[in-house]
Image (cartoon, rainbow, N blue to C red):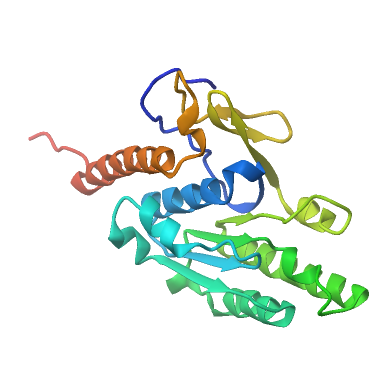
Amino acid sequence: MYTRSRRPTADLPELTPGVTLVDVDDDLGVTPVQALLLDQVLGGDGPAFWVDGANQANTTRLRELAPSDRVLDRVKVARGFTPHQHTSLLDRLAGRLDARDSPSLVVATGLDGMYRGADIEGELAKQMFIRAIASVARIARVHDVPVIITRCREDEFSRPLRRAAGTHLQCRATPFGPRFEDAAGDVETLVYHTDDGWMQTTLAYWQEVLEHRARIHEASTLERAAGPIGVQ
């Protein structure tokens, strides 16, 4: 779906429960994933948990993107600095969540990154990597929530991530702005169109999109709170 407007639209992809693999063009960085995270928090009631394995959890950028500070109160960020620490974080997250603490979203960026280094040997690295994937899949299954995962690179080692994901989205930089595509070819969403295209990789672009989304979510929340109008 293409939208030709100088204003941001509401066309960020709608995340469904299950594991979604998101591949992002290098020059767009992690910001599109941050935008998806914040959008999901805006539209949901539960917290979001972000476990980072590739030093991508830039909380300063997240604060700059957020339409309001109260949104950030519901975002919990943890970083794994070693393979064992990263696996432990995901295990603990999968084990601690219950019905009262059901998340609106879980994000695991660079899920394969920690298991590619020289800290652990090949077979053990593969075993720990599969265990990490199993943890995020368990969260998606038990809590029926969206889980976003990203990978450091696409190769034979990261192939289990693709197999675990029910949805595969790609965010590409185009002359018309960032475009999210379903890798299966079923969905193509042009998030934003500008005539010059220069805003497509800037923080200002994503800020404007999220501010627009916040207004939509706020209006929807007010409508739900008001309830049906009775006729006497």
Q: Residue furthest left?
A: 232
Q: Position of residue 5 (x, y in %)?
A: 40, 19
Please identify the quadrant where the N terminus is shown.
Answer: top right
Quarter of the figure with residue 226: top left
Please determine whether, in this image, residue 201 is positioned above or below residue 193: below
The residue at 61%/74% (across/down) is: 94
Whole-percent x and y of residue 123? 92, 74
Residue 3, given in percent of the width and then of the height, sits at 47, 20
Outermost residue on the right side: it is 123
Tell me where residue 71 appears, x and y as whole percent: 34, 59
* Quadrant of the rendered image containing residue 188: top right
- Where on the picture, by quarter, is residue 55? bottom right
Q: Quick check: 143 above or below 225? A: below
Total marks placed: 0
Q: Residue at x 28, y 46 (%)?
A: 221
Query: On the rendered structure, is 189 left or right of 73?
Result: right
